Image (spheres, rainbow, N blue to C red):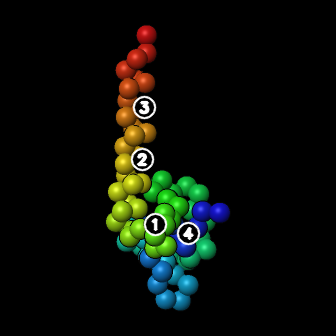
Amino acid sequence: MKTCLNCGLGIKDSNDLVSCFKYKTLNNSQEEKTNCIYYIEKIVEDGEPLPPIQHLLLAEQELGKRKMKISINDGLRV
């Protein structure tokens, strides 16, 4: 389930709230984020999750790849 608590951009706050590193908002930690384009599973290296800034860079890189594929495919129509 995609929730703010499971997202690499979520920063656990007090009172079961999670701060979103990208949008600078406070959300319920169990709030469903199925439609959030920046949602990224937490990546753990050496037993520690990557910092939110690295998760954000990875998410933006993935979004950039998708846009590139779309623009290339649009240009190949015959």
Q: Distance between the residues labelled 2 and 1?
A: 19 Å
Q: Name the residue under label 3.
A: 70
Q: Which of marks 2 and 4 is nearer the N terminus?
A: 4
Q: Distance between the residues labelled 1 and 4?
A: 16 Å
Amino acid at pointer 1: Glu
Amino acid at pointer 2: Glu
Q: In the rendered image, which quarter is residue 56 located in?
A: bottom left
Q: Which residue is drawn at 55% across and 73% down?
A: 5
Q: Earlier in the sequence, mark 4 or mark 3?
A: 4
Q: Earlier in the sequence, mark 2 or mark 1?
A: 1
Q: Residues within 10 Å of mark 1 (few under 14, many from 20)?
A: few
Q: Is mark 4 on a helix, strand or loop?
A: helix
Per the rendering, the mark at residue 6 is 4
Q: How far apart are marks 3 and 2 (CA)?
A: 13 Å
Q: In the rendered image, which quarter is residue 21 located in?
A: bottom left
Q: Earlier in the sequence, mark 3 or mark 1?
A: 1
Q: How crowded is mark 4: few (under 14 residues within 10 Å), some or many (20 or more)?
A: some
Give the foreground label among 2 and 1: 1
Q: How crowded is mark 2: few (under 14 residues within 10 Å), some or many (20 or more)?
A: few
Per the rendering, the mark at residue 2 is none
Give the foreground label among 3 and 1: 1
Where residue 25 appears, x then y in whole percent?
42, 73
Q: Name the residue under label 1.
A: 45
Amino acid at pointer 3: Ile
Q: Earlier in the sequence, mark 1 or mark 4?
A: 4
Q: What element carries label 1?
A: strand
Q: How far apart are marks 3 and 1 (CA)?
A: 32 Å
Q: Name the residue under label 2.
A: 62
Residue 74 visible in rendering: yes
Tell me if residue 4 comes above or below residue 35 in the rendering: below
Residue 21 visible in rendering: no
